[in-house]
Image: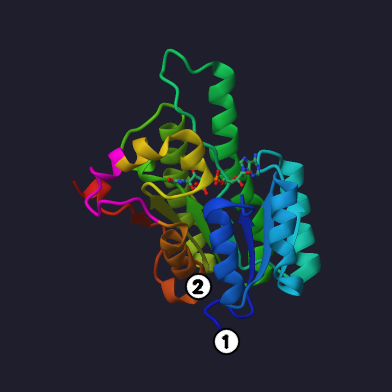
Amino acid sequence: MGKLGGKVAIITGGARGMGAAHVRRFVEEGAKVVITDILVEEGQALANEFGDNATFIKHDVTKAADWETVVAEAEKAFGPVNILVNNAGISMNKGLLDITEEDYRRIVDINQVSVFLGMKTVVPSMQKAEGGSIVNISSINGLVGGAIGYTDTKFAVRGMSKAAALQLAPTGIRVNSVHPGVIETPMISQGDSKDAIQEFAKFIPNRRIAKPEEVTNVVLFLASDESSYCVGAEFVVDGGITAQ
Ligand SMILES: NC(=O)c1ccc[n+]([C@@H]2O[C@H](COP(=O)([O-])OP(=O)(O)OC[C@H]3O[C@@H](n4cnc5c(N)ncnc54)[C@H](O)[C@@H]3O)[C@@H](O)[C@H]2O)c1
């Protein structure tokens, strides 16, 4: 049996990028995976690769009603939920004087309110399973400053992970945050040119950006029982950027 044998997992933003890497590995490790995203074609195509071991649900993480549906459908398909990876997110590279109030509320909704809604909605299901693991994807910008808006939301994810972890730890539900550095996904390739990424890589102690699977290894550890004593902690995967 794999590291996640018998577990039911929800992975948001699972249609592409890091989320898709987590989905692939989770299925390999024996989990039944509910892939959620607003990208219907990509999400459905990914789920089709895994037959009965995965299902796709269209899900806007900013909507409480969508969350209710996702958890209910996950339970119906596979049983009570053991693992939630709050991975969906967007980036935004605008300065303080350029970002609009609308932009700001949008990124807070997608990157921050979504994580609150996800934790709140999934916990009753995890209580039925008598335990669980919530892995919240923050960023190195949840530890050190970066773009306005994005940084704010990622610090919030780090904070709410600790608050929820303290409350839920006695019930056997663990919450931790993951802080990736620069990872090769559509989020990065759509925002920056290859040359800009190579230039930035010179300032990373590892001298390269990471593959999504290098983050998956840490997410898998936190989702599995191997991390049974990790509670409200921060897991940095950044090639040394924040160690400088
Ligand atoms: N790529 C990086 O360098 C990096 C670094 C640090 C943290 N992160 C974080 O990792 C997570 C995954 O990022 P990625 O790089 O794989 O990006 P990505 O853009 O490739 O994937 C993000 C996914 O989230 C989905 N999504 C966006 N808005 C949504 C919504 N409202 N409802 C449901 N799904 C939605 C997108 O459709 C997409 O499939 C994000 O939270 C991101 O902030 C990324």
203 left or right, relative to 73: left
The residue that appears at 56% across and 77% down in the rendered structure is: 29
Mark 2 lies on a secondary structure that is loop
Residue 56 quadrant: bottom right
Tell me the colour scheme of the image: rainbow
Mark 1 lies on a secondary structure that is loop
Q: Position of residue 201 (x, y in %)?
A: 29, 45
Q: Is residue 2 above or below residue 82?
A: below
Residue furthest bottom in the image = 1
Residue 131 seen in render: no
The residue that appears at 54% across and 32% down in the rendered structure is: 108
Q: Is residue 120 above or below residue 146?
A: below
The residue that appears at 42% across and 50% down in the rendered structure is: 183
Q: Position of residue 184 (x, y in %)?
A: 44, 50
Q: Position of residue 106 (x, y in %)?
A: 59, 28
According to the picture, the residue beneath numbered tag 1 turns out to be 1
Magenta range is 199-210
Mark 2: which amino acid? Answer: Ser
- Residue 203 in magenta stretch: yes
Q: Which mark is residue 175?
A: none
Mark 1: which amino acid? Answer: Met
Q: Nearer the viewer, residue 188 or 122?
A: 188
How far, Cα to Cα, is label 1 from label 2?
Answer: 12 Å
Residue 114 quadrant: top right
Residue 119 seen in render: yes
According to the picture, the residue beneath numbered tag 2 turns out to be 224
All told, the count of numbered labels is 2
Question: Dot 2: few (<14), some (14–19), or many (≥20) neighbours within 10 Å?
Answer: many
CB of mark 1 within 8 Å of CB of mark 2? no
Residue furthest front in the image = 195
13 left or right, relative to 150: right
Question: Dot 1: few (<14), some (14–19), or many (≥20) neighbours within 10 Å?
Answer: few
